[in-house]
Image: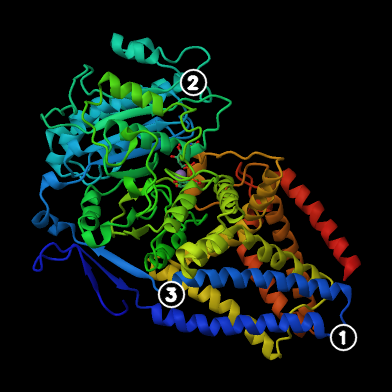
Amino acid sequence: MEGRRLRGGFTTTDSPPLHTSEPLRRTAFNRLFAAVYFSAILALLYRHVQNLFLLSTTSLLSFSTILSLFISDLVLAFMWASLQALRMSPIRRKEFPQDLKQIIKDEDFVGLDVFICTADPYKEPPMNVVNTALSLMAYDYPTDKISIYVSDDGGSDLTLFAFMEAAEFARHWLPFCREHNVMERSPQVYFESNYHSSSPHFEKIKIMYEDMKMKVEHVMDKGKIADEYISDEQRRQVFNKWIKGFTRMNHPTVIQIMNYEQVILDKKHDKDNSGRLMPNLIYVSREKNNTSPHHFKAGALNVLLRVSAVMTNAPIILTQDCDMYSNDPQTLLRILCYLSDPAIKSNLAFIQFPQRFHGLNKQDIYACEYKHHFQVNPMGFDGLKGPSYIGSGCFFHRRALFGGPSTPVPPEIPELSPDHVVSKPIQSQEILSLAHHVAGCNYENQTNWGSKSGFRYGSLVEDYNTSYRLHCEGWKSLFCNPKRAAFLGDVPITLFDVLSQNKRWCIGLFEVAFSKYNPLIFGSQYMGVLMSLAYSHYAFWPIWCIPVIFYSFLPQLALLNQFSIFPKLSEPWFFLYVFLFLGAYGQDFVEFFLAGGTVRRWWNCQRMWMIRGLSCYLFGSVEYLLKSIGISTHGFSLTSKALDDEHSKRYGRGIFEFRVPSPLFVPLTMAAIINLFSFLLGLTAFMRGNNMEGLGLQMILIGFIVLNCLPVYGAIALRNDAGKIPTQITIISTFVSVAFYYASSLCF
Ligand SMILES: O=c1ccn([C@@H]2O[C@H](COP(=O)(O)OP(=O)(O)O[C@H]3O[C@H](CO)[C@@H](O)[C@H](O)[C@H]3O)[C@@H](O)[C@H]2O)c(=O)[nH]1
Ligand SMILES: [Mn+2]
């Protein structure tokens, strides 16, 4: 494959290619560097083993110190080695949607069912969810081929109300976008952008939008729908379903097909104000009760999979988080470039777009862009069997969710089969009652849902888990990363939210790592060594906490006791350490930079890696452990997408927001304190002219960590705003640090 430009998407020999792929130029370097770096790792491990067993003067203390460093370095080595799988054959793809029209006709465009998940109207404001839906409805695509399904796990009449209003607005918004060739199809983004249309329609549509927004926000403020907003008997009947005892965890199924003119039209699609057909818009809140497991987002997606099968059964499905609006109306044309290529279509499970975000601050202080995870590593996966699914911005072949390419798993009723043709209008009674039936909370009992078909259960990272299992079944996937982001979403803007989100991922990843489907053992039999290594890299993500914690405390406590644990500056081994450090950080930087990153953002990214190591990787591992012995039951802690003015301002200025008195911050605060004190002590010893040769490497490491902790010092001592580290966290951390110091001085 190397060196050759792969062309695909031909239907006749002289038509232009619809997509190409080429290997990244750095591939050869990556392989060479991996060989060199691997030798260096072996040398380091050799040194540890030698120290462990061959030194005659080994005391218990130095033995356990060396052992700790050895374990840490083994973990680092494993994480490094598994990552190399993604550096072996990365590729970059390009598609040419402008040539599509020459090859396929409008009527050949495939049907698309869009799934949008939302789960809490207060953490995920309905106006945002509505904007996401509107942006997707307004794709440049035959509108009658699109159906939007909204899953509301919050079971909220407020969200439903917002969608009823949105349906009204959509009748005007869609033709407006077409006529004015609007690029920003999320109305919120469009009206906020500096662009001002001279069209008389502009003011009119803006007023309509503001009017809708005002109504929805009013309803949100009041927490209920005022009578004056219930315009007719039909709406009243819908909202009457929210009777006393209807809670988000306990309620019957609500399925509401939006009709754009508030009259039921017995046909497949409604029309917009210019007479064009409108996409279907369907609100689904699945049945819930306190006794049946609902499997969080995976459960919600499986309900949509079934409800949509009964109603429209489009062969392509787009899964979308409620904050991820469409930023490019042409995205569907891009995916058609792949779908129309018979050479890749047959075993292609999904096409994944990267998650990209709006509203990141300039330096991305919490490294929420996840550039490696969402943009760099998927290219590495793409050169193997394809990227993993990341929950949003992913186009599935419906068929891929029903067994392997050559081993189909038929659903329990024929109406759910991917080949089933829907012949009745979606408003018909039979369709509606079947849809309610398949959305019931006991429907999945004794079926393959969540195990052999649909989105897979058993992990809080249902996305990772599902694609892993699909790849094991023999499916492939591909990564599509156009210059203009296809989707843009929200990022959490407080450190606590970021770390809680990461903690959930850690628990979910461990749930896969320590299941019978462990990617190293099970995965390697079905996907090959490289894919299995790549998936393992993520499955074992939380074990980063082992080296991060050891390296944040051990050399520091040793230095406080004048104890040397690394080679002297004059020894050749010193250069090995320097090479290993610079090599890993250097390569990481180059990849980040080549993917369009800045130096500051990279710096923050490596800082966040350290912070995560000292918080969520550790707490996630502990929580996973407690969960597996039945002590805690961790649910899906939703990431808040609601913006608070004061937070937003500080975030915009790049200031860390701690605020919450959470134990998550204790190890980090301790590391900051201990590193600072050991650094100061080392510095004074150096000024006094003590011989520091044996402690040189320790000082360099500590200096690096202190630099990384600068925002933490500010948040402990120099700030007075509400976002600083809460005083009790500082006090606890100081006490524990002092205790650590005393304990260490007894040992060293
Ligand atoms: O019981 C639930 C819980 C969550 N969600 C939805 O799942 C989506 C993701 O939740 P969010 O709180 O935004 O989590 P993130 O950590 O930001 O999401 C990332 O990680 C998740 C796995 O943990 C993936 O599902 C997401 O697609 C991916 O963007 C949202 O649309 C939620 O409404 C549900 O529908 N039901
Ligand atoms: Mn999210």
Residue type, label 1: Ser
Q: Residue at x 66, y 52 (%)?
A: 621
Q: Where does label 1 land, which residue?
A: 56
232 with respect to 679 (left or right):
left
Q: Nearer the viewer, residue 288 or 332?
A: 288
148 with respect to 8 (left or right):
right
Q: Residue at x 13, y 62 (%)?
A: 11
- Identify the mark nearer the N-term, 1 or 2: 1
- Distance from Cα at disc 3 to Cα at disc 1: 42 Å
State the image coordinates of residue 270 (x, y, percent, origin top left): 18, 27
Residue type, label 3: Met
State the image coordinates of residue 420 (x, y, percent, origin top left): 27, 37
Q: Secondary structure at mark 3?
A: loop
Asked if residue 631 can be seen in this view, the reply is yes
Q: Where does label 3 land, which residue?
A: 88
Q: Secondary structure at mark 2?
A: loop
Q: Residues within 10 Å of mark 2 (few under 14, many from 20)?
A: many
Q: For residue 496, which numbered disc appears in the image?
A: none
Q: Where does label 2 land, which residue?
A: 251
174 with respect to 489 (left or right):
left
